[in-house]
Amino acid sequence: MQDINEIIESEVKRPSVFIDESKLYPEYVPDKLPHREEQIRQLTRLFKSIILRPGTVSVRTLLVGPIGSGKTVTSIVFGTNFSRLAERKGVNIRYVHVNCSKSKNPATIFREIKNQLGLNLPDRGLSATELGSALLKLLDMEDLYLLVALDEFDYFLRVSKPDDRYMIVRFYDVFKTGVKRLNFIYITRGTPTYISSLVDDITGSYLMKNIVMFNPYKSKEIFDILKTRAEIAFYPGVISDDVLDYIANLVGTDNGGDGNARKALAVLHAAGKLADKEMLEGRATRVTIDHVRAVFSREYPSLINLIDTLHYLPLHELLVLKAIALAILRTGEDYVPMGVIEGVYRRLCSEIGEEARGHTKVYTYVMDLRHRGIIITRSNIKGRRGRSTYVSFGAIPLNELIRKLDHIISSKRLIQ
Ligand SMILES: Nc1ncnc2c1ncn2[C@@H]1O[C@H](COP(=O)(O)OP(=O)(O)OP(=O)(O)O)[C@@H](O)[C@H]1O
Ligand SMILES: [Mg+2]
């Protein structure tokens, strides 16, 4: 049997592409938030009156945006920095982050706030109203103000009773106190229209007064987020900008992705893990685009479902797709120009005795493949002269794709 210490030591010494993998964990809170400066600015403008005139008003804001658009992390980073600044200015503000999918009603929300503050408040058997009042009394005693973030608040809106909703959204209409110590950041996934569809008009107008919007990230923005994280997570030189750019193009909303930063970071992390595994087998020294492709197809089988779509595409569109895959494989480039693709396509056609379609038709096929999210296109590449359309493949390892395509193409030709 192997010595335990030996096992541990050899694992610790094992080569890795990571300096610190934890910097890619979803719960890691970075100190830089590229492309969320405007949201931080808006939040500061909304909440600054708490520092300037503490207790005079209770500020409420609604953060709205799709999955992985940085709502939670922005709220945490803003809240902690804002309360630190307030403290330097002599105002005692604490930031509390409550997840409403765990704390589903006012009583559990108040209890959670109290627990996070470490306040000594007996809560057994108290009603929500009693708990709320007791909490306010304690805050008075400690001269403490709160910034309460209620995360996954759309969930609360969907499951709560009207009275409970009223208590949380119109807190100071229920708890009528002179000094207002509670301020709220309601965090919701979706769009403003969707959120207002969950509530009645009056609650809606209360919630919608101060909206901070989070749009899904564009490729360029995802790239910057990945870059700042990669710098602290990987050893220098093991991951190139091209790899980050590739992930950014898969995920960015302007390239047909959903703009979800969590997904982009998860792919980056998993690609690093795969590179580590291959490093041990002596097959890799750095993270490559092929690692990304492999991870993406494994982690996001929905993309693989695209293969189902392939069955519905016309024969020549499939041939163009095969030409793209072949051209990328043969040239070893991540992006290939249209001209090369057309050449390969024409050769493929003549091999199987099909008459090749003209340039315009091929171009429409490429655009259709792009709209379906199967491929990625770009109109220029650094270091290459002239404007042309360059194409790259989105999801799965190319050999696997070519195998699938061959299968579908031959069955299509049989039916024809
Ligand atoms: N601008 C950014 N800079 C750095 N990291 C970011 C940025 N935006 C998001 N992230 C990271 O991406 C992940 C997802 O972000 P976050 O959890 O804030 O999204 P969300 O909008 O709350 O999504 P959900 O609706 O699923 O709760 C987190 O790991 C977060 O740290
Ligand atoms: Mg969130």
Image (tube, rainbow, N blue to C red):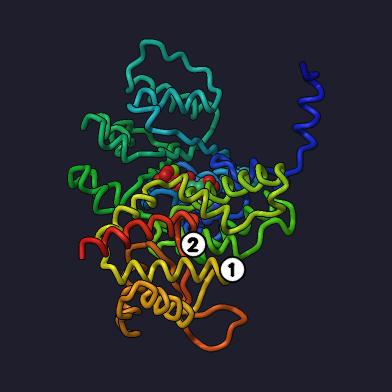
Q: Which residue is mark 1?
A: 332
Q: Secondary structure at mark 2?
A: helix
What residue is rendered at 26% in x and 31% in y?
A: 160
Q: Position of residue 12 (x, y in %)?
A: 77, 34
What residue is rendered at 57% in x and 43% in y?
A: 80
Q: Is residue 281 above or below residue 345?
A: above
Q: Is residue 330 above or below residue 126?
A: below
Which of the numbered marks, if any, corresponds to residue 38? 2
Q: Earlier in the sequence, mark 1 or mark 2?
A: 2
Total marks placed: 2
Q: Is residue 78 visible?
A: no
- Answer few, some or many: residues within 10 Å of disc 2's Cα (few below 14, many 20 plus, some between 14 and 19): few
Q: Secondary structure at mark 1?
A: loop
Mark toward the viewer: 1 or 2: 1
Image position of 134 (left or right of 316): right
The front one of 324 and 202 is 324
